[in-house]
Image (spheres, helix red, strand yellow):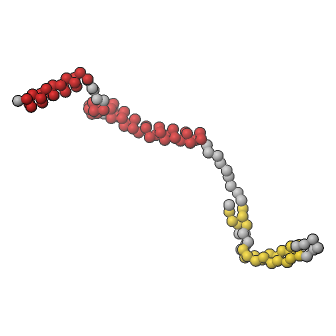
Amino acid sequence: LRVVMPGPSWTSRRAIDITSPEGSNLDRNYRGIEVTFDYSGEFHFWNFEAIFFLFIVCLILHKLPTAIVDFTALNVMGHLSVMYKSIVQHNFDVAKTVSGMALRLGMNSMLFAM
């Protein structure tokens, strides 16, 4: 919606109205500001395919830097990569862990028995 004012905005207009079937009329003088409207515009629908595509692109771009940094840290940096892999990938042996816990428990209970 756009307001168009091509000339002077103050105007005066005369109107004659017929008010009855017998022919009596009413003479009026209108004074005031004349405003003209220019209607134009567009109407769009939601494009769900574009929204879904944007969501997927954001998801990929969010995960991509993490994948690049992980690959670089774990594979490209030589001996430092070996140290990083040992921290990220924990080697867990159940038998070794349970036997170590049992040995520590036995040693602690032996200290309290004395």
Q: Is residue 10 above or below residue 109?
A: below
Q: Quadrant of residue 86?
A: top left
Give left or right: position of 22 versus 80.
right
Q: Which residue is situated farthest in the top direction here?
A: 95
Quarter of the image with the N terminus in it: bottom right
Residue at horizontal 70 percent and vertical 57 percent from the top: 40
Give left or right: position of 6 versus 66.
right
Nearest to the observer: residue 99 or residue 60: 99
Q: Number of callouts in the render?
A: 0
Where in the figure is residue 20, as x and y percent of width and height? 90, 72
Q: Quadrant of residue 68?
A: top left
Quarter of the image with the C terminus in it: top left
Residue at horizontal 28 percent and vertical 29 percent from the top: 90
Give left or right: position of 64 versus 97.
right
Residue at horizontal 94 percent and vertical 73 percent from the top: 22
Where in the figure is residue 74, as x and y percent of width and height? 32, 32
Q: Which residue is situated farthest in the right direction here?
A: 22
Q: Which residue is situated farthest in the left direction here?
A: 114
Whether residue 105 is visible, yes or no, is: yes
Nearest to the observer: residue 49 or residue 92: 92
Residue at horizontal 68 percent and vertical 55 percent from the top: 41
Where in the figure is residue 50, as x and y percent of width and height? 58, 41
